[in-house]
Amino acid sequence: MTRRPIPREIRFWSNKRGATAVEFALIATPLIALVLASLQTAVIFFFDQALQTATQKTARTLMTGSVQTANLTQTQFQTALCANLPSQFQCSKVMVDVESAVSFPAISTAPLVLTYNGSNNVTNTWNFNPGVAGSIVIMRVMYDWPVVGGPFAIGLSNQPNGSHLMVATVVFKNEPYQ
């Protein structure tokens, strides 16, 4: 008695070799996307904290009156702030807004809104009023962090140009300096 050959279609569908490779291929794309999104989130949190730390350190120079007695301009103050930031920040993209008032209720804590031109560059003009001894000061430092990952970075970009706006804010009362 001779055996009849099994048709090719049946042999293909019943073959289990390579099933693991196919299953991995189905799972690999979402897994890689999840890992990339997690890494991008970690990078944003890390550099957001670095921005906050540099802002606090630089705000101390305002609070003690060093900036006011040296008559630093907004550009000079921004350069001093950039010296406290990690090298991954581009100083030209750092935005500093310093406002002062006579009392805490008089200080404006309204969120700042960025406006962009056709080239996705910020067009806002920021204030630089460090106040005098005893003034209440709010210092806000902003940075448009580029988000890498395209569709895998859903929810990380919060600006129309696809970047993530980091904002560090410090509110304090200037010390009685001479």
Image: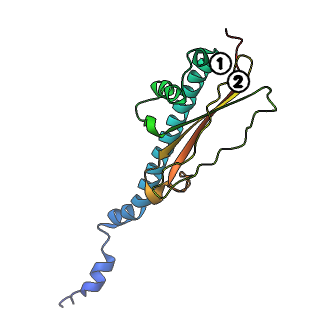
Figure check: 157 above or below 68: below
Write the residue at 72% across / 42% down.
Answer: 110
Disc 2 crowd rating (10 Å Cα; few below 14, some 14-19, many 20+) is: some
Q: Amino acid at mark 2?
A: Phe
Q: Considering depth in this image, is 25 or 78 the residue closer to the camera?
A: 78
Write the residue at 28% across / 79% down.
Answer: 12
14 with respect to 120 (left or right): left
**Residue contact between numbered discs 2 and 1, judged by CB atoms under 8 Å:** yes
**Residue 15 spot, x, y in % from top left:** 30, 74
Figure check: 106 above or below 40: above
Of the numbered discs 2 and 1, the one sitting upstream in the chain is 1
Q: CA distance from mark 2 to mark 1?
A: 7 Å
Q: Considering depth in this image, is 77 or 170 the residue closer to the camera?
A: 77
174 with respect to 125 (left or right): right
**Residue 63 bears which disc, if any?**
1
- Residue holding disc 2: 172
Label 2's element?
A: strand
Write the residue at 80% across / 26% down.
Answer: 103
Q: Residue furthest top?
A: 178
Figure check: 96 above or below 69: below
Q: Amino acid at mark 1?
A: Met
Figure check: 43 above or below 75: below
